Structures are given as structure tokens and as C-alpha cells.
Amino acid sequence: MNTFFKFYLQSWVLLSLAAGFALAELFDLGLSARVRRVLVPAFVAASAICLAYLPCALYGRAQTRFTPHAPLALNGEAFFATAVYSRDGTALRLADDYRMIQWLRANTGRNDILLEAQLPEYRWGGRMSVFTGRQTVLGYRHHQSQQRPITALGEAIALRKQNVQAIYAGEDASATLAALQHYGVDYLVIGGLERAVYPAAGLAKFAAMCARGELVRVYQVGDDLIYRVVHPAGDLPVYGAHW
């Protein structure tokens, strides 16, 4: 399907070019005045409908933005300043997320692994990974499960989803630390989205882990936190197909 709709766009461009030549040839056939009186208005009407697509599509697309009334700009991240995302009735200011994104961009390495809220497709989950280019344990899972229907891969994805949920929601700090180290997680994010998705009792354990030196608080603005995971000396992340 991806291949189809990618080539589909080019097909319309080629069709439009061919249609121009075809139309010129059609009018060069010596059509009668009666036929021209029918054909020309029909062509003008069809062309008007096609030309209407551009302004209508631009307007419709503009209304799907987080903040439809924000000024137009070429900066694809300008929406962060005013956008508000609603999660189960909780309003989340994306400006708070943007501060964390900027911090992660400036203070983490390309190969660092983040952990953040994992949500169903077409939601706000995975936003730190998306806007920083850093890896995450599980982001947009559907492309893998849909396009690579391998039983073992599906099981691995499902397990990762369960483990991300368990890391944030579970209250067993020892199991949480083991999972963080297993996936080689370097930074753990607790923003407004994580607080809206996961129970407070599960999130509370991270402060205790920080007090024991298992995590280091490297960012805090209000209630938003980023922890660095402390890995034992010589304990490098396991790269490859570890679930």
C-alpha cells in the first residue's frame, strides 16, 4: 500500500501532462460548433472544480493543526508555543514538552536511548524520540507489526509494550531497574503525558530510586523530570534482538 500511494502521486502528475496534450489534439479534430458549445463549458466547469481543490485543501489542512488560529509560518515546531493536547480530559501544554525536547537535544548523544510514554498509533506518544532523533524502547509499533507479520516479531513488540507499561506503572523498583538496564535505557522522561497515562503510585518509585543512586535527576522544571539511568561499570547495552 505504501508503494502504491507513493507512485500514485507521480501518476497524477504524468496524467495531467498527458491530458494537456490530449485536449489540444481533441480540439484540433475540427469539432462542430454544436459539439464545441457542449464540450468547452464542460471542460471549464471541470477545470474550475479541480482548481478549487487547492484553496479548499489548504483551508481544510490548516484546520487540523493543534492551534488552527496560530499564525502561519515555515517553522514546523512553532505549534509547541501555544498547542494544548488533551489526554483523557487532562490538558497538557506542549510548551512544557518542548523544553524537555530542547534539553534532550542539547545534552544527550545520538546513540542514547530514551524511555517515554508509549501510546496507540496517532497519539502523542513517542514525541521525545520523534523530535530529538534519539532511540526509544517502543515508539510507533504498527509499522512493524503491519508490514512485517512475523510471529516472533509480534511477540517481541507486545512484550516491549507490556514492559514499558510495567516500568512506569509498576511499584517494584528492583524489577524496574532490571528492565531499564536490560533495554539499555539512558534517560527516563516523566512529563505531563506520563503523569496523565500512568498511575502516581508507579511514578513515585523513581524518586526513591534516585535517592538510592540508581537514577540521577538531570532535569526538573515544575513537575517535569528527566532521570539518567546509572548503569554498572562495564555494563554496556546489549544491541541486537533482545526483547
Image: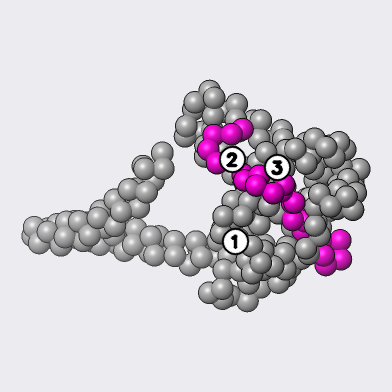
N-term-proximal mark, 1 vs 2? 1
Q: Looking at the image, which residue is at 88% across and 38% down? A: 171
Residue 182 x, y percent position in the rendering: 67, 38
Read off the residue under disc 2.
238
Q: Is residue 229 magenta?
A: yes
The residues bearing labels 1 and 3 have C-alpha atoms spaced at a distance of 17 Å
221, above or below 192, in the image: below
Q: Is residue 122 left or right of residue 177?
A: left
Q: Looking at the image, which residue is at 80% across and 35% down? A: 175
The residues bearing labels 3 and 2 have C-alpha atoms spaced at a distance of 9 Å
Secondary structure at badge 3 equals: helix
Q: Looking at the image, which residue is at 66% across and 57% down? A: 128
Q: Is residue 41 left or right of residue 212?
A: left
Q: Residues within 10 Å of mark 3 (few under 14, many from 20)?
A: some
N-term-proximal mark, 1 vs 3? 1
Q: Which mark is residue 92?
A: none
Residue 72 x, y percent position in the rendering: 58, 75
Q: Quadrant of the C terminus?
A: top right
155, above or below 176, in the image: above
Q: Quadrant of residue 137?
A: top right
From this viewpoint, is residue 69 visible?
no
Secondary structure at badge 2 equals: loop
Disc 1 and disc 2 in contact, CB within 8 angstroms: no
Read off the residue under disc 1.
109
The segment highlighted magenta reads 220-243
Disc 3 and disc 2 in contact, CB within 8 angstroms: no
Q: Is residue 56 magenta?
A: no
Q: Which mark is residue 181?
A: 3
Q: Residues within 10 Å of mark 1 (few under 14, many from 20)?
A: few
Q: Amino acid at mark 2?
A: Val
Residue 151 x, y percent position in the rendering: 53, 23
